[in-house]
Image (cartoon, rainbow, N blue to C red):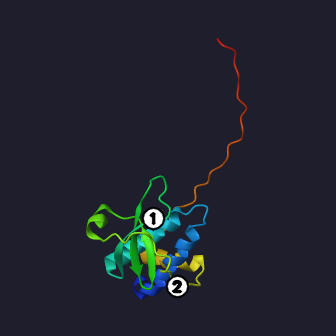
Amino acid sequence: MSEPSELSSQRIAQAIFTVNKHAKTAPDSRFLYQMKKAAIDQMLKEGKAKKVGLQYSRNPGLSQQRSDLLVECADYMFHIPPQKSDFKELPHLGKLSDNVRNPKTRMNLREAKTILQSYTGLKPAPAQNQQKTAYQRPVFKRLGE
């Protein structure tokens, strides 16, 4: 498609938004979240995004309370897992605000993945061919045989 230098911050942020939206309902979302994290990390390194602060997570998993790092990319806001240094350097903003919403975006997943793969250089892991072995009935032997 286009070279990483030609991609605008807005276009990359739209692609991250699309990938993130699809990852929430995908059966295997690991690669989608990996692309999102890699793209945001690269934008942070290049100065195209900035860390805003920490917020409590709506889905803390097995813990009682967990914080996520809020990152601003162009007109979009994203949450990623924080690093230990973020707790020392950034303010904690408390609960998520329902007033802040990302802009609506119309981009298909294939286009978003192409943009993020060209920006980050990540490639999907090759699909492993898992052949199902035929069912073998257990063999029961008498004790002592």
Upstream in the sequence, badge 2 or badge 1? 1
Residue at 71% x, 41% y: name it: 134
Please give the residue where the numbered disc 1 appears in the rendered image. 57
Callout 1 secondary element: loop
- Rounded to the nearest angstrom, the CA distance separating label 2 from label 1 is 21 Å
Q: Residue most toward the top?
A: 144
114 or 84, which is in the foreground?
Answer: 84
Which mark is in front, 2 or 1? 1
User: Amino acid type of disc 1?
Assistant: Ser
Give the image location of residue 111, x and y in percent.
Answer: 56, 80
34 or 128, which is in the foreground?
Answer: 34
Residue contact between numbered discs 2 and 1, judged by CB atoms under 8 Å:
no
Residue at 50% x, 61% y: name it: 59
* Residue 119 visible in rendering: yes
Q: Residue most toward the left?
A: 88
Give the image location of residue 87, x and y in percent.
Answer: 30, 64
Residue at 58% x, 59% y: name it: 127
User: Amino acid type of disc 2?
Assistant: Pro
Q: Quadrant of the C terminus?
A: top right
Callout 2 secondary element: loop
Give the image location of residue 49, x and y in percent.
Answer: 37, 80
Relative to 81, 128 lies left or right = right
Crowd tier of the residue under label 2, counting other residues whose Cα lies within 10 Å: few below 14, some 14–19, many 20 or above: few
Crowd tier of the residue under label 1, counting other residues whose Cα lies within 10 Å: few below 14, some 14–19, many 20 or above: some
Asked where in the image residue 91 lies, by quadrant, the reply is bottom left
Residue at 49% x, 65% y: name it: 58
Please give the residue where the numbered disc 2 appears in the rendered image. 103
